Amino acid sequence: MTNSKRATISFSIMALMLMIVGFGQSWNVALTIINLCLISAVMSMGLNMQWGYAGLFNAGVMASTAIGGLTAVLISYSPVTKAWSVGGTSLTATLISLLVTIIAGVLVWKKMPKGSKRSWSMTAVVLTGYGFMRFFYEQATSAIEAVDPAKTGFLGGLGLPILFSWLAGGVAAAGLAWLIGRIALGLRSDYFAIATLGISEIMISILKNEDWLSRGVKNVTGLERPVPYEVDLQQTEWFINMVHWIYGTAEDGSPASAAALREAMQLSAGVVVKLCYSALFIVVVLIILGLATRALNSPWGRMMRAIRDNETAASAMGKDIISRHRQVFIIGSAVIGISGAMLTTLDGQFTPGSYIPLRFTFLIWVMVIIGGSGNNLGAIIGAFITWFVWIEAEPASIWLVSNLDIFLAETSPLRLHLQEVAPHMRMILMGLILVLVLRFSPKGILPEKAPDHY
């Protein structure tokens, strides 16, 4: 079966399952799943660029996601003026101390001859600089975090439209990837995976504990939306008329009609808002898909696959392996950073405690493996399947257990046990799907199409 037929069948089945959720549960639930799947598709395409194009085992996906989410806060949240007034000067002094330390260290390293004297001088410069930075930094953070800690306690952001943060999140994640690449690229694949996972844990730990920057585990809420609010929609004339037209609700003044109208408006408002998010996310997915496919089919993409398949031969042909790996690592991380900013936009809040590197890195890898590494459409269908199962496994299991009356009595120990373990069925199903795909389609649902030549 060709990939085009596989793709048509896969996306058709996925659409059917989403329609079943829409009619069986609610369209709000179905659209929530679709939006999360679209964000996951962006994330999956970013990882697919790193692994599918170049064979880089990146276990630090959550670092790029979290940086993208933090960027959404720093771009869109209004600046906390009082926090800047009490801590801005000390933070500036911290930054100046850092720059002076770096400059002094570079001068000592370059101007002094190699030997113990240079080593002692470098140690003195670093310790002195660290002392000044620590002094000013503690002053700044203590003052900032004391500013109305129940509501703010951090610096805030620039107060710009949150859509700008999507691009900025990609740039920030790319900058972090460049730094990681300078440190870790060139290591053997297993060591590189360990290094990226460790750096991811470090980044999440920083975001959880640096309250002056991200509010830590207190979370940042109330971020501006790029779409209308449900309350505002329910007061708009065109929306009210649309609800009347769809539901045919008669305004006869009776309590039943008024209650039905309110419920219809609330449900419809949620659907319209989620549809607006879906439209924005689909645009991003299509843009990234188009650019990623173009890059994959270009000479650059063929070169990356040649490096992935045989680094020794590519190096013998004069290719700079580490430099090319750095390129694709930065590009893939930038795409993941965009998805992190999109996720924070959808949630309307930034919650560092929800970023769990091991769990969610595993899920993103499952998306790429199930869909087919090296295939961008495969990364998208893998994201849809994975998130759909992850979200729907629990309610489906609970529904199934609750309808076992004909087999098990209400007080049956087995029935009670199944009710307890039903919420954990998502882990079993994810493992089962992964095993089945690897057994019957080792290259994924949509395998990578082998190029005619490099």
Image (cartoon, rainbow, N blue to C red):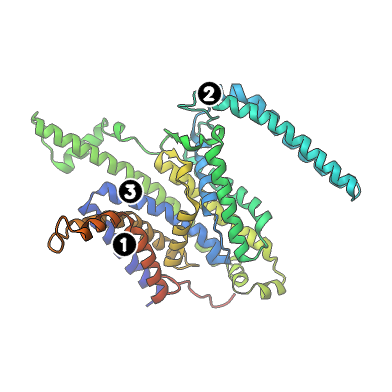
Question: On the rendered structure, is 295 left or right of 430?
Answer: right
Task: Say whether disc 2 or disc 3 marks the residue closer to the N-terminus.
Answer: 3
Query: Of callouts 2 and 1, which one flags the residue occurring earlier in the amino acid sequence?
Result: 1
Residue 169: mark in rendering? none
Q: Quadrant of the C terminus?
A: bottom right
Q: Which residue is mark 3?
A: 32
Above or below, 30 against 75 in this view is below
For disc 2, the neighbor class at 10 Å (few under 14, some 14 to 19, many from 20) is many
Q: Find numbered disc 3 in the image and state the secondary structure of the residue it sits on.
A: helix
Q: CA distance from mark 3 to mark 1?
A: 15 Å
Q: Is residue 249 in view from this perspective?
A: yes
Q: Is residue 144 above or below residue 349?
A: above
The answer for how far apart the CA atoms under marks 2 and 1 are is 49 Å
Query: Contact, CB < 8 Å: mark 2 with mark 3?
Result: no
According to the picture, the residue beneath numbered tag 2 turns out to be 147
Q: Give the SS element for disc 2.
A: loop
The residue closer to the viewer here, 142 or 52, is 142
What amino acid is labelled 1 in the image?
Answer: Met
Q: Which residue is mark 1?
A: 14
| Cβ atoms under marks 3 and 1 closer than 8 Å | no
Given the current orientation, which residue lies at the most extreme right position? 113
- Dot 1, how many residues are within 10 Å of its Cα: few (below 14), some (14-19), or many (20+)? some
